[in-house]
Image (cartoon, rainbow, N blue to C red):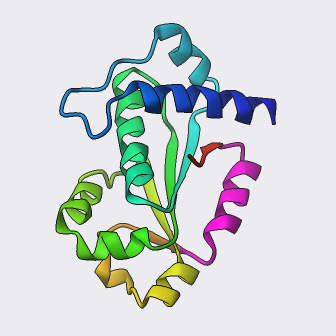
Amino acid sequence: MKKTIQFLSLAAVMIFSTATFAQDAPKLIDKSVVETLNKTPNYGFGASEERPLRFSFMMYNQMKESGVEIKNYEVVVWGKVLMDIKENKELFDYISGFMNENLTVSVCAVAMNKLGIKIEDLPKGIQVVDNAFVRIYELQALGYNFLIP
């Protein structure tokens, strides 16, 4: 629990120290913080709105560019933001550009069903999980540092 609280505090500082939707590259994370983060290479980020969703990818870039060793980084998405991904081509393309072997985007089947969204409506490579909240619990049980802003 203490590790999760420390990570949440650090993540909040990183998010709010980076300008929203900034055009400039994010500030590199201090080397001493990188050393601490490298003790746990698995990270998760939960998002139900566009702004935190974009921040999750910005944070991934900032961590990667700062030298944080990321084994797994999973963004768990639920709620009406799924409709935004489907209908907003710029957001759809933005997410598509991040899909790689170290980054997983999981979306909630419950939200998809309620919103009438099919997997074909979302960027390629996204995985569907039965329930976003259960997935978050699972990632935490696996030792992921997890943040939901």
Which residue is located at x 67 percent, y 65 percent? 133
Q: Is residue 127 left or right of residue 146?
A: left
For residue 144, above or below residue 90: above
Is the residue 112 above or below the residue 29 in the image?
Answer: below
**Quadrant housing the N terminus:** top right
Give the x, y percent position of residue 19.
32, 30
Is residue 88 found left or right of 105 in the rendered image?
Answer: left
In the foreground, 35 or 111: 111
Residue 108 found in image quarter: bottom right
Rendered view: 4 above or below 80: above
Relative to 101, is 73 on the left or the right?
right
Q: Which residues are magenta?
A: 129-144
Query: Is residue 25 found inside the magenta-colored segment of the image?
Result: no
Which residue corresponds to the image point at 63% horizontal and 28% vertical from the top-left? 9
Quadrant for residue 55, please give it: top left
Q: Nearer the viewer, residue 131 or 35?
A: 131
Dominant secondary structure of the residues highlighted in magenta in the image:
helix
**Residue 141 is covered by the magenta coloring:** yes
Tally the marks: 0
Q: Nearer the viewer, residue 13 or 143?
A: 13
Residue 122 picture location, percent across and down:
32, 74
Q: Nearer the viewer, residue 27 or 50?
A: 50
- In percent of width and height, residue 76 lies at 53, 60
Q: Which residue of the protein is positioned furthest toward the right in this rendering?
A: 1
